[in-house]
Image (spheres, coloured by chain):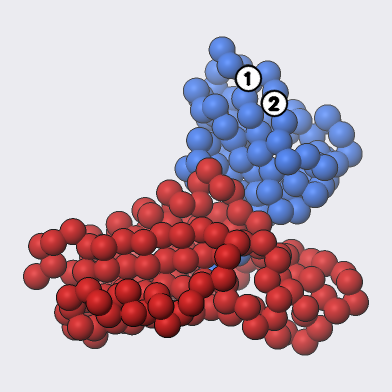
């Protein structure tokens, strides 16, 4: 299974994306099991937009490294990761992750792995822009590090769950 | 040897007031943390940016490294808060 090289697309862009078109690209690959995650700007009372800053020279390489790790771990036929930057209003799409495999478990697990690792290893920083005009940087969540660490533990050497 | 380029992101950029700066390469064996100690005297902004050491993360030539890593031959150092993408 999955002897062929997976079809990988990684985009770091200010532009919006069409979730349906991205899923259609993945559905056109052999495999038959597609899992995806789309993250939007949440309306956290008083928020008008998020501004995402990133480290251009590093971002694409970090995301590609996470994708390679997922491909080494599950028999994937395709992966798409899109991460936006710039100023994104409430309701805007921020991130898309899609994974194709032969069976649902691999697709679902790979999708969760990709977004969990992107959160802790892709060099993006979110700034909140609030209705009163004030701005504040979003603090990193310990829970995100814990989720990523969980995948490391599941690799078997420590504490399998 | 070439100077060292330092990039700042998010509130570290805001506090230093700089996107990037170029500094003389520190002596061999200098760690990232030691360089930040030295650079804290450059301005009040640098001092404010580098004061909360536990909230800083770093990359050398676009790879994450802990602050106690020696800068070595790296050409680019980046200093930033923990990432919050996704």
Q: Is residue A150 visible?
A: no
Left or right? Give the position of B11 relative to B1.
Answer: right
Contact flag, marks 2 and 1 (Cβ < 8 Å): yes
| Chain shaded blue | B
**Is residue B63 depicted above or below A81 in this figure?**
above
Residue A123 in the image: above or below residue B47: below
Quarter of the image for residue B20 reads top right
In the rendered structure, the answer to whether residue A146 lies left or right of residue B2 reads left
Q: Which residue is mark 1?
A: B3
Front-most of residues A83 and A114: A83
What's the chain of the residue with tag 1? Answer: B
Image mark for residue B22 = 2
Report which quarter residue A3 is drawn in: bottom left
Answer few, some or many: residues within 10 Å of disc 2's Cα (few below 14, many 20 plus, some between 14 and 19): few
Which class describes the residues within 10 Å of circle 1: few (<14), some (14-19), or many (20+)? some
Nearest to the observer: residue B36 or residue A25: A25
A138 versus A33 height, above or below? above
């Amino acid at each position: 299974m999955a002897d062929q090289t997976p079809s990988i697309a990684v985009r770091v862009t200010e532009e919006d994306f069409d979730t349906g078109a991205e899923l259609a690209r993945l559905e056109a690959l052999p495999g038959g099991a597609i899992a995806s995650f789309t993250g939007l700007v949440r309306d956290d009372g008083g928020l008008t937009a998020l501004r995402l800053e990133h480290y251009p020279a590093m971002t694409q390489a970090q995301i590609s490294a996470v994708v390679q790790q997922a491909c080494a771990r599950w028999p994937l036929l395709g992966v798409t990761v899109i991460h936006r930057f710039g100023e994104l209003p409430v309701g805007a799409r921020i991130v898309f992750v899609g994974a194709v495999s032969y069976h649902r478990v691999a697709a679902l697990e790979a999708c969760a792995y990709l977004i969990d690792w992107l959160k802790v290893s892709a060099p993006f920083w979110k700034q909140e822009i609030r209705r009163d005009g004030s701005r504040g940087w979003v603090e990193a969540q310990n829970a995100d590090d814990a989720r990523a660490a969980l995948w490391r533990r599941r690799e078997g050497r420590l504490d399998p769950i | 040897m070439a100077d060292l380029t330092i990039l700042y992101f998010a509130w570290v950029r805001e506090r230093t007031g700089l996107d990037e700066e170029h500094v003389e390469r520190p002596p061999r064996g200098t760690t990232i943390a030691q360089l930040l100690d030295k650079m804290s005297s450059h301005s009040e902004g640098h001092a404010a940016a580098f004061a909360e050491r536990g909230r800083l993360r770093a990359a050398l030539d676009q790879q994450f490294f802990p602050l106690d890593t020696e800068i070595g031959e790296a050409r680019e150092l980046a200093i930033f808060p923990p990432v919050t993408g996704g």
